[in-house]
Every structure is written in C-alpha cells, then in structure tokens.
Image: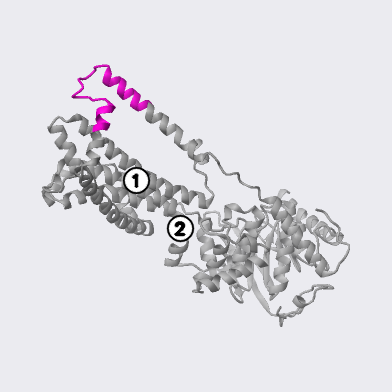
Amino acid sequence: MALEVVDHRESDRKALRESEIRGHDALDLSSTPRLAHSVWRAAWPKLAALAISLGLWQLVAISGWRPSYVLPGPVPVFADLGSQLVTGELWGAVAVTMTRGVVGFFIAAALGLVLGVLVARSRILRAAIGSLITGLQTMPSIAWFPLAILLFQLSEQAILFVILIGAVPSIANGVISGVDYVPALLVRAGRNVGASGLSLYRHVVLPAALPSIVTGLKQGWAFAWRSLLAGELMVSIANRPSLGQFLNQSRELSDTSYMIALMIVILTIGIGVDAVFSTFERGIRHRRGVVAGQTQKGI
Amino acid sequence: MTISTVSGRAALPDVQSVRPCSSGPSAIDLRGVSKRYAGQNGILALDNIALTVRAGEFLTLVGASGCGKSTLLNLVSGLDQPTSGTVEVDGQAAFMFQEHALFPWLSALDNVATPLRLRGVGKNDRHAQAREYLAAVHLADFADRRPHELSGGMKQRVAIARTLATHAPILLMDEPFGALDAMTRDLLHDELEAIWRERNLTVLFVTHNVREAVRLGDRVVLLSSRPGRVVQEYDVAIDRPRRVEDPGVAALAGEITAALRHEVARHGA
C-alpha cells in the first residue's frame, strides 16, 4: 500500500486514491457467516426439555404417589385438552381472558410510557414518586384485590385496576432506566446535528432507550398476565367465562385432568406472548449489532 | 465547484502553495480568552488565549495533555462560556468527536439525513442529499449499512458526511482520527483535505499527533499545558496535497515536537 506516486497529475492521483479507499474498505469488512442450522439449534434443547418433563410427570403418575384422580398422567390430560379444544367453550374462555389481558396491557403501556418519560425528565417528579414506582413493583398484585373489589365490586373494572397497578410500574421503570442510560455522547451528537427539546427526545433519546423500553413492556406483560389470572380466580363475572373461572370450577368439581389442561393452556399463552416480545427484542438488538448471547454469557 | 471570495484555492488542482490569505475575514476570533473551572482548586484551563482562524483556513492545534484543547473547542461551539475575554464565531460550527457518535439504530444514509430531517427537509429530498454526502466520503455503496456493519474508518467517514449535512461552514474536530490505525488515518487525511478544499470549509482541528497537525494544517498552533497558552504558531508552507511521510512534513513536525517536549519538560522541573 505504500505506493510511491510518481505521476503527479491530479486525475491519476484521484483514481489511485479512490481505488485505494475501495480496497481498504473491502479489506476492513469481514463477512459474517450465517447460521445454517439456527432453527434446529434453537429447537432441540426445548424439545428435549419438554420430553424429559413429560417423562418425569409420567413416572410420578405411575409411581402411585397420588391416586390418578388427584394426579392424572399426561395421557388423560392431553386427551381431555384435545377434546376441550374441539368444543367451543374453552376457546370462548381464552378469548375473554386474552381480551382482558391485551386491553389491560395496552392501557398500561400508554400510561407507563407517559409516566416514565415524565419521571425521567422531571427531577421533582423523580424525587417524589421514583422510589414509589419501584416499590409498587415489589407489591404482589393480589394484595390489591380486596381494595379493588370494594372500589369496583366484582366487575371488569376491578380486574383492569389490578392489571394496571401490576404492569404500569414495570413499564415506567423500563422507560426511566432506558432514558437514564442513553449515552451522553449520543445526546451531544443529537444536539450537534440540530435536535433540541422534544425533537431530541423523538430522534435520539427514545430510540436510544428502545431496548430498555421493550424489556419494560415485556416485564409489564408478565405482571399484567399474572394479575389477570389472580383476578379471574377471585372475581368471577356472570356470563363471562374465563380461564381463571374455569380453573376454579375444575378444582371445585375435582376435575384435575381438566384443571391441568387449563394450566397448560395458560402456560402456552404465556410462552407464546413472551416469544413475540423476544422476537421483537432480538430484532432491535440485531439491528444495532448487539448479539444477545455474547453479553449474557459473562453474567 | 464554487470559487470562494476568500481564496481561490478550491478551483486549482495543482496548488503551488496553499497559504491562507493573511488579510481574509476571520471565522473564529478569540481575544484574551481565559477559562477557570469552578471548584476548590479552580483550575485555570486556558490563559489569555488570542487566536484567529480565517475563513477557509485549516488550523490545527497541538499540545500535550491538559493544554485545554477540548475546553477551547467547547468555548468556540458555545457549549461553554469563557471566564474572561471574547469568543466570536461567524457562522454555525459543527462538532466531530473522537468517537463516531453515530446513531446505532439508523442506517448510514439515515444517520447522514438526520440533520436534514431536523431542519424539515422532505424524505426524498433529504435522502438524495444524504446520498451525495455519502458519495463525497466514498461510501455511496454503503448507504443501507448500519454503523455496526462498518469499519472504524468508515464510521468516521459517515460521521464526516453527517457533519457536512449540518451545512455548518465551520468544523470543530476533537481528535477525530485518534482511535484509528495509521493507514486508515492516512486515507481519512486525504478525504478530509479534499472535502475541505472542495467545500471551502473552515476547520479547527485538535490533535496531539504533531505529524497529523503538520500534514493537515495551513497553520499549526502549539499550546502549553496547565494553563493552556499559545506558545508558538507555525505557518505550514508545504505544497498540498501532502503526505504524512513527506520530508518537509517530517522536518517541521520534528521542530514542533522539540518545542512541545520543551513545554512538557517544564512541568517536570
């Protein structure tokens, strides 16, 4: 590369310079190999874990530790689940529960985002309610139900109230920590290219905080989902059959196999929604060149 | 290519000697500038600095640690205020940092388009303009890459393109190539020099690499440390384009380095 420029004509010099730059760029960029078996690599540990859990469950069931009407094995449970999935009743309950969860989550997300930005921006608000938000997160949402029932009776509002109390603090905390950890250099760069006030938030601070915001939303969903199921166990509303209500009924009827089938449904929904959030998180990390496994291995 | 009213250098390919016009209008003018930081020690960072950067001039500042180089740039950019003295800047000044400071969630193109977007330029318009700025740093083919998909030198070039998109006539550069390897730095010197000549920019470039300062500057200003004072100014009467290994560059760099060492030694005495 240490070529001596003999010809001093500008055009030659420029052509040499440009090919030099191109060559340098080509050498600088190493190709990143794509993972060909990524699907299989991600799937087989999960499948193996599932097979082992089912196997253990079956072993406990046939050991006779508990009579089969108290703890049925996986075969009758999945048979029961299959027949319930064919009839419409279970789907109706799933729809009611999911609607409550999704509506509650979106309201919580809107409130949490606004609250988070306000607290992150205002020193006074942070001093006033910053630790309260973290405190609320540690409070089990089920402890709010007696109050919620007194305030709203056995109603949708009571359930919604507890979902919000559970989810809003997590979401707000995600926003606050995201905004707090935006690199000062990026804020400086943002001001340098002409951003200020709201446009600085819109173009620099919030995009930079997005990974933490999504983590907060994911955690918010987990809190909302837990609060919702707890709420449905306590608050049953006539003509609104829900997963929680069915769970209660199956316990009252000692229908353990249906009860476990319902638990599997609840777990599956939880895993499914979590997978949606994780896909979103991975996409964000990938776009920014942060590889998930690399940073987490060291912890 | 526009011919500046200040100096005609941009139109001349084979420049004999790129000397700044000694009587041109000033872009940056510091008079009797001192900066003392608050605190119990009250460190005096800059002491009675008089410095004029003419419009279209490439001025490099060198000095050892603690010479207040960054403080001086902050004063010029308006991020900080002098304790005494006046700072006059004619036109907008855009900063370039040692770190590229690109937005990791945006492609190279959108990074460059951000200053335009913030000024309300429409999408098609700003993308077309951003492509031109990327082409100016020879990265037209990398418009859709994100920062993490670019090498260190390429990121700094995107940062240069983004700085150009601010349309600021004055560039303040705080050791922008300090973190790059020597070969990449050489290429970026060429690129920056070409852009400066074509666009008639005024550059105030801070570095502690004396050869880099001589390679790039019309004038090199040597600062002392704690407090920062102007020790000496050197006119660089070497034809452009220069190379860092040119004998003339090496000779002047040697002279300045000797003076710099003398300055550093005073603190050990």
**Chain to which mark 1 belongs:** A
Identify which residue, A85 or A145, lies in the foreground. A85
Let me know if residue A72 appears in the view. Answer: yes
**Residue A207: mark:** 2
Highlighted magenta segment, given as a residue range:
A52-79
Q: Is residue A193 above or below residue A165?
A: below
In this picture, residue B236 sits left or right of residue A152? right
User: Is A68 part of what is drawn in magenta?
Assistant: yes
**Label 1 belongs to which residue?**
A273
Q: Secondary structure at mark 1?
A: helix
Identify which residue, B229 or B62, lies in the foreground. B62
Q: Which picture quadrant has residue B95?
A: bottom right
Q: How crowded is the residue under tag 2: few (<14 C-alpha within 10 Å), some, or many (20+)?
A: some
Q: Residue at x 84, y 73 (%)?
A: B16
* Residue type indicated by callout 1: Val
**Looking at the picture, how far across and down is residue B173, in whole percent?**
64, 63
